[in-house]
Image (spheres, rainbow, N blue to C red):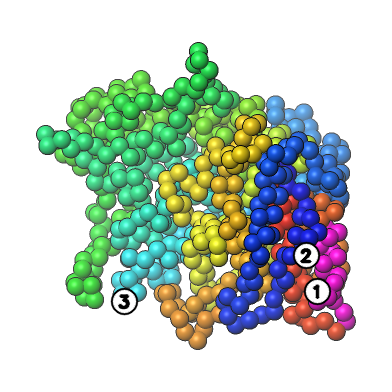
Amino acid sequence: MHLPPLPDDIRRDLPSVPADDASPTASITRVRPGLLSVLGAAALQACGGGGSDAGAAPAGASAGGTGTAAAGASAASASAGTSDGPAGRRYTGAGSDAEAARFLLQAQFSASDAEIAQVRGMGYAAWLAAQFAAVPGIGAWDWLNQRGYGAVDAARYYDSTYPGDYALWFQLFNAPDAVRKRVALALSEIFVVSLSGIDVSWRSHLVASYFDMLSANALGSFRALLEQVTLHPAMGVYLNTRGNQKENAAGRQPDENYAREVMQLMTIGPVRLNADGTPQRGSGGGTLDSYALGDVTNLARVFTGWDFDQSQNAPTTDPAQNNRSIPGTAFTRLPMAFTASRHSTQDAVFLGTTVGGGTAGPQALAQALDTLVNHANTAPFISRQLIQRLVTSNPSAAYVARVAAAFANNGSGQRGDLAAVVAAVLLDDEARAPSGLADPAFGRVREPMLRLVQWGRTFGLTSARGSWKIGDLSDPATRLGQSPMRSPSVFNFFRPGYVPPSTAMAERGMVAPEFQLVNESSVGGYINFMQGVVRNGLYANAPDLPQSASNAANGFDLTASYVRELAVAGSAGDLLARLNTLLAAGQVSADSLSLMAKALDTAPLALTAASSAGTRLDRVAAAVLMVMACPEYLVQK
């Protein structure tokens, strides 16, 4: 997908970057409605919508999407970055900083000068292997307890969701194992549990533990991941396996929610697939269902008899809540426990497998999960979604087939080795070839939460008091329109097959999942929100306290440093070149950069010998905002 540079009249309407203000909302200037319409239309047009020619490159754009680094990417790769390696993996190293940044922004959240140098020096595969072995930092669950969120007191953390938001944002901004966390975030959009959909004690601890579990398994065995997802208490609450009981004479039947979604969304998908992810078709040309209602009903019997493991429970009585008994937090990270008397005794016949009614619950579960993991659909279904989350929305069938082959066999006979799958996604020629930069059908819209995390990691975001009080940013009108593990439903923030309606993309059978988040409200909300954040940072109430409160310490506790950017702020060209590489992997076109430079060299952003530190910061912030609002940035290639 390729988005054209914004027209001059749109650029003139971009909001200016304000000076510091004590108010958390004073820095937000509303974008006029007409601008929102044009921005949304430009995005759809560039991605094949609006009746335009999806194959046409925007006027003034070079083949590589930029007049500088990317323009020579093909030649650089041909000379220094290719080899006669395994099929589909000719591009072994980066021939330029832009190519290294491009790889980094697909593999993790951000690109730094040091990481770019490492990738260029080590090559793609060696760098990736080193990241797979990176030692994790403190987990989300432990961070909650370290910050005091496990206490039973007047703050009532046990009934609060905001500590979960803080913990998740802390992980995304700070975890040293960024590749693992990036994959874990992608998995959280496949194996969906939402903080907005859990209403039991210690909901923040449940979701923090769930993210820790995804992180621990992100580069391990898919079979182990699926079992831990299935037995995790957060999933038990979210999709009703917790407390799910066998059928009885009164007509009770096992809840079918998880049985349905584990097939539809987490393993085999709704239609039968070929090994390359393309749908199988019947004699009439229609797709073929991969499962039927009977499969759901029978599989649901396997998921009975499981509930919270309270074997380590140390409850506390809360006098302020009418002596309510509050359980300890231990259960939130223990796999659910099995009670045989609640487990179905009927045969479970599904997907060609029969689990006998006399089979013990844990063994029945193992047999069911083995069936799902070994199903022919699972490799292409999961592989395609990981490609979509990390690289491109519309991978070729050959690309999916190569990744699915790595899922089926990692080279050592192991099925579902996620490290091998992630490597196959990121090292494939379709991900690495410079030709993708000029292909209007290649790439993906950057998710709003990934843009914020990239900004924070790129420019050294810190919390002065260690609070990391970044809450739910789901409101599309005033914030990002997305927040980690805050999906509105089990179907994630967007569907993998979403197509913007009434567009050329629909006519051509292309998809754009992240566009399900795009509307006039979200486009304007993003720009307004980022305008304040980029210049002033993130405002926190009572950053000196863990709980939700307000006091004299209220202020911009989370701020970026921009040390290296301020050092080159005197030259608009140098500043923009740096931002283009770090934020967009050199994919912002020369025409767009020229327009941005003119804006920076015009009052009040132009610098003189007498310019204050605040003016220099205004200039850097304006440059960052322009790049991060540019369509050539918003679509990652």
Q: Return the mark for residue 154.
A: 3
Q: 313 or 551, which lies in front?
A: 551
* Three-letter code, disc 1: Leu
Tag nearer the camera, 2 or 3:
2
Residue at label 1?
Answer: 605
Quarter of the figure with residue 433: top right
Q: Tag 3: Cα neighbours inside 10 Å, few (<14), some, or many (≥20)?
A: few
Quarter of the figure with residue 268: top left
- Magenta highlight on residue 262: no
Instruction: Tell me what residue is drawn at x 74 percent, y 80 percent.
Output: 614
Instruction: Find numbered disc 2 in the image and state the secondary structure of the residue it sits on.
Output: helix
Instruction: Tell me what residue is drawn at x 75 percent, y 60 percent.
Output: 10
| Number of numbered tags placed on the structure image | 3
Q: 353 or 588, which lies in front?
A: 588
Q: Is residue 199 above or below residue 269?
A: below
Q: Return the mark for residue 198.
A: none
Mark 3 or mark 1: which comes first in sequence?
Answer: 3
Q: Tag 2: Cα neighbours inside 10 Å, few (<14), some, or many (≥20)?
A: few
Residue at label 2?
Answer: 12
- Magenta highlight on residue 607: yes
Mark 2 or mark 3: which comes first in sequence?
Answer: 2
> Where are the magenta residues, as a range?
593-609
Instruction: Give left or right: position of 436 versus 329.
Output: right
* Three-letter code, disc 3: Ala
Q: Are marks 2 and 3 in contact (CB under 8 Å)?
A: no
Q: Is residue 494 above or below residue 481?
A: above
